[in-house]
Image (cartoon, rainbow, N blue to C red):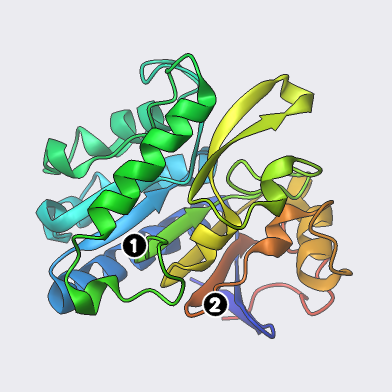
Amino acid sequence: MSTKMLNRADAQVRVYRDANEVALKAARHFARLADQYVVGCGRFTVALSGGSTPRAMFSLLSQAPFADTVPWDSIYFFWGDERTVPPDHPDSNYRMARETLLTKVPVPDEHVFRIPAELSDPATAAADYEATLINLFSKQTPSSATAPLSGLPRFDLIFLGMGPDGHTASLFPGTTALDVTDRVVVANYVEKFSTHRITLTAPTINNARNVTFVVAGPDKAEALGEVLEGAYNPELYPSQLIHPSHGSLLWMVDEAAAARLAEHHGTES
């Protein structure tokens, strides 16, 4: 295995050989944090993302050794965003995680909190999920619930992807959700898809203890270079909005995605 670590002002970037290695390292990262927070806080709260690399990570987690060693009964699962489709729809992020992971490991049903994106009104779906998060996280023990920003849930880990356009979760370039600072979850209209998406807001993501991007593929190289090394322009590259206020930011990327980073010259052993 090989990796190269690049230290940014507010983030660590780990460059791996390919998407398969990113998925494996992300699975190990998940398992390590799950153990850490279950031992320290009694439970582990994680928000999942969609995408091909997370799918590969979920598949790895559903197999040995992870399936037998991760404390699944103390993990609570959430989602960073969702398309406005029913939970059994092929495009559903929830369905992907359910089929590749959640039905294959002993996670209690009551620990899985999907976004009710099938509701006819996206704003209602966002409000319902926001209420669910606020209610659940307000019941945490004081040591686990300590949040720098009052009223926002404090996830232990949020996984994010990034699109070729620089979006993350469902925070797309030029959309109204980029300017929201007083909500946990919003319905964000995405003009290029002519539909709403339900998404955590940037302040909610930035309140997490750990935020981890998993990014792979040559189609991400230009956006990744701009996000990490370009001028600050979150209206064009929304992933730049993500900088946890009291947490850790980690980018797990493959060589192809890192090709345009000035400091990247291949992986190191």
Residue labelled with disc 1: 30
**Where is residue 173 shown, x and y percent of the image?**
78, 44
Going by the numbered disc 1, the residue's amino acid type is Phe
**Where is residue 15 shown, x and y percent of the image?**
62, 69
Q: Secondary structure at mark 2?
A: loop
Classify 206 as above or below 245.
Answer: above
Q: Secondary structure at mark 1?
A: helix
Q: Please tell me how crowded label 2 is: few (under 14), some (14-19), or many (20+) other residues with Cα within 10 Å.
A: some
Q: Residue at x 37, y 34 (%)?
A: 128
**Where is residue 246 shown, x and y percent of the image?**
48, 80
Residue 255: quadrant of the picture: bottom right
Classify 124 as above or below 16.
Answer: above
Q: Residue at x 50, y 59 (%)?
A: 204
Alpha-carbon span between mark 1 and mark 2: 21 Å
- In the rendered view, does 113 fall on the left or right side of 254? left
Upstream in sequence: badge 1 or badge 2: 1
**Residue 238 in view here:** yes
Classify 220 as above or below 1.
Answer: above
Q: Residue at x 51, y 60 (%)?
A: 205
Going by the numbered disc 2, the residue's amino acid type is Ser
Q: Residue at x 70, y 50 (%)?
A: 178
Residue situated in front as seen by the camera: 168 or 56: 168
Residue labelled with disc 2: 245
